[in-house]
Amino acid sequence: MEYTDSMLMELTAKGDDEAYSLLVQRHYQAIFGAAVKMLKDRYLAEEITQKVFLQAYRAAGRYEPRAKLRTWLYTILRRLVFNQFRKKEIQSSPLVTEKGEDRDITTYQSTTSPLDHLMKQEQMEWIEKSIDGLPPRQRMAVILKSYEDLSYEEIARILGVSVPATKSLLFRARETLREAFRKWEQNLTTKD
């Protein structure tokens, strides 16, 4: 029998640790991935992700399935991440990776020249840096929409704002990113 998230939360509330373990397995990568993108520190993201699931476990008896469980988990993540920002423990820094981990995700033989590859890598770094520079709410909205592919309604629930406010956050973030991209392109033309 395939258990739904709601069923697993109900079992977790009754003390079923196997149900809780299955919930964690289902949602861990998505929550951890969003945490890494927001925090830019794998170790801190791991800590925050564990806190998300600990809070979910403690609140299992109060969980009401009004939205997807993942949306509820992202809401917990948002609160914890924003608390980190408020504490000013987060600084703009490059992504911390484990030893041996390669940031270049290209695993196939590329037909592009090394120069084209370098330009693409530089462009991606500029985009990451620009996203990192966004205000926390805008950054989270961009990450949830672009990387996690959530709907406006889900993002609104997670951020605790209306759908129009969510669209406005994303619009402002995209405008900021477009401007950053224009500056990056101008940098390229002035280097030549």
Image: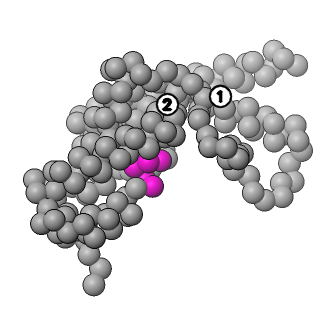
In the rendered image of this protein, does residue 32 appear above or below residue 90? below
Q: Nearer the viewer, residue 186 or 84?
A: 84
Q: Nearer the viewer, residue 136 or 52?
A: 52
| Magenta span includes 83 | no
Quadrant of residue 94 within the rendered picture: top right
Quadrant of the drawing holding the N terminus: bottom left
- Side (left or right) of 82 relative to 30: left
The percent coordinates of residue 135 (x first, y second) are: 42, 23
- The residue labelled by disc 2 is 174
Residues drawn in magenta? 29-33
**Three-letter amino acid code of the residue under disc 2:** Arg
Helix, strand or loop under label 2 = helix
The percent coordinates of residue 114 (x first, y second) are: 88, 41
Q: Which residue is at a point 66% across and 32% down the rendered structure image?
A: 125
The percent coordinates of residue 67 (x first, y second) are: 21, 55
- Side (left or right) of 74 relative to 107: left
Counting the numbered discs, the total is 2
In the rendered image of this protein, does residue 6 appear above or below residue 47? below
Q: Which residue is at a point 65% across and 23% down the rendered structure image?
A: 182
Q: Which is the main secondary structure of the residues drawn in magenta?
A: helix
- Side (left or right) of 6 relative to 28: left
**Three-letter amino acid code of the residue under disc 1:** Trp
Q: Which residue is at a point 23% across and 36% down the rendered structure image?
A: 160
- The residue labelled by disc 1 is 126
Q: Nearer the viewer, residue 7 or 18?
A: 18
Q: What is the distance, in whole Å, between disc 2 and disc 1 at their CAs?
A: 14 Å
Dot 2 or dot 1, earlier in sequence: 1
**Closer to us: mark 2 or mark 1?**
1
Badge 2: how crowded within 10 Å, few (<14), some, or many (20+)? some
- Side (left or right) of 180 relative to 43: right
Quadrant of residue 81 within the rendered picture: top left
